[in-house]
Image: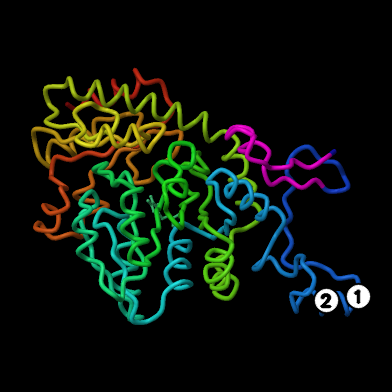
Amino acid sequence: MSDFIDNEDYGFATRAVRAGQVRTHEGEHGEPIFPTSSFVFASAAEAAARFSGEQPGNIYSRFTNPTVRTFEDRLASLEGAERCVATASGMSAITATFIGLLSAGDHIVSSRSIFGTTTILLTSFMAKLGIATTFVDLPDLNAWQAAITPKTKMLFLETPSNPLLDLVDIKALADIAHRKNCLLVVDNCLCTPALQLPLALGADIVIHSATKYIDGQGRCMGGAVCGTNEIVGGGVYGFLRSAGPTMSAFNAWVFLKGLETLELRMKAHCQNAQALAEWLEQQPAVKRVYYPGLKSHPQHELAKLQQSGFGGIVSFELNGGQKEGWKLIDATRMVSITANLGDTKTTITHPGTTTHGRLTPEQKQEAGISDGLIRVAVGLESIEDIKADLARGM
Ligand SMILES: *Cc1c(COP(=O)(O)O)cnc(C)c1O
């Protein structure tokens, strides 16, 4: 009943199934859930030693929990990170990264094409704490370089972006960041470590919304921050244990099971998305398809270079506007009208009136969110059924 000894010789799939597990004296095969808020000490002296940090071990589940630790160690192994800390949601992972590592007066340069709530966190709340953000176009390396000031401490991005699937060259941007003593933070939610390893390309921190593909079946909220012991084990963990957005043991267990099938699921998402994107390109009602796996994608070569698959999100622009977009969505009978992504179930959204609905017409135009734009997070149903459902309203 030996524990899995993680080492670099094991392949991704092996580590996804086994890394992080520490068996108890019961010899259980599956990973146990530890639903306990606190942990018991053998003596007053041991309690004192744990609290002072002299002796390692669990104290309280806001700090550490064995099920959560197993998830953290498994995800760290997959991302190639020294350390991972789990959080209650993707947003708390992002918040912990900003607040745990930055101070009033510091400056962030961020991609303009990021998750909407992250934009609000930066513009409404981080700004209030004295941490300003400059937004730039994701692919434009010159714009990133030009936006960095002596106060800049962090560059933040998602690649590919959502919903338009633009990319940035992570390696080139890591060079720019490090020449200026900035940390490069990549929200790797859309690709997951099964398709893209930002740390190996030079990024300092990888963030996840585990709610998406890591769960993979739309059940639990969770997040994670991966990086070095110094950075993630220092400021990020320090903030989390004091502020408290911890992952629950139950959710950690669900995500552990998710990681075990992550690579298989991502391959299937990619396969369905590629087939759907190619089919959409043939449809007369469709003006343009956005998918990095298409030869027509302006960054197809970069996608081939830095990703091992093109992902599960496909966006397309209809010849018509909002009316035609809503008609297509309302004509579907199977796919779910919801903004979530990373689920086995295909979802469809009209970004212009939902995720990006609060933007002004000028902001929408700048962000490339047209009235006829539709985003599909391609699930794992039979591809012919997905196509047939979208064809109904075209
Ligand atoms: C959903 C999402 C988040 C936020 O994660 P939650 O788990 O919903 O808090 C952050 N980044 C990206 C790219 C996302 O898709």
Point out residue 133 in the picture as x, y percentages from the top left corner: 27, 70
Per the image, label 2 sits on a secondary structure element best described as helix
Report the Cα–Cα distance between label 1 and label 2.
6 Å
Quarter-wise, where is residue 300 in the image?
top left
Point out residue 283 in the picture as x, y percentages from the top left corner: 16, 21
Q: Is residue 42 above or below residue 252?
A: below
Q: Which residues are magenta?
A: 2-23
Rendered residue at 42%/74% (across/down): 102
Question: Which numbered tag is attached to residue 47?
Answer: 2
Point out residue 121 in the picture as x, y percentages from the top left corner: 34, 68
Rendered residue at 74%/40% (across/down): 4
Rendered residue at 69%/47% (across/down): 20
Callouts 1 and 2 close, C-beta under 8 Å:
yes
Q: Residue furthest right?
A: 43
Rendered residue at 32%/29% (across/down): 333
Quadrant where the image shows the C terminus = top left
Point out residue 11 in the picture as x, y percentages from the top left corner: 60, 32
Which amino acid lies under the numbered mark 2 shown in the image of this protein? Ala
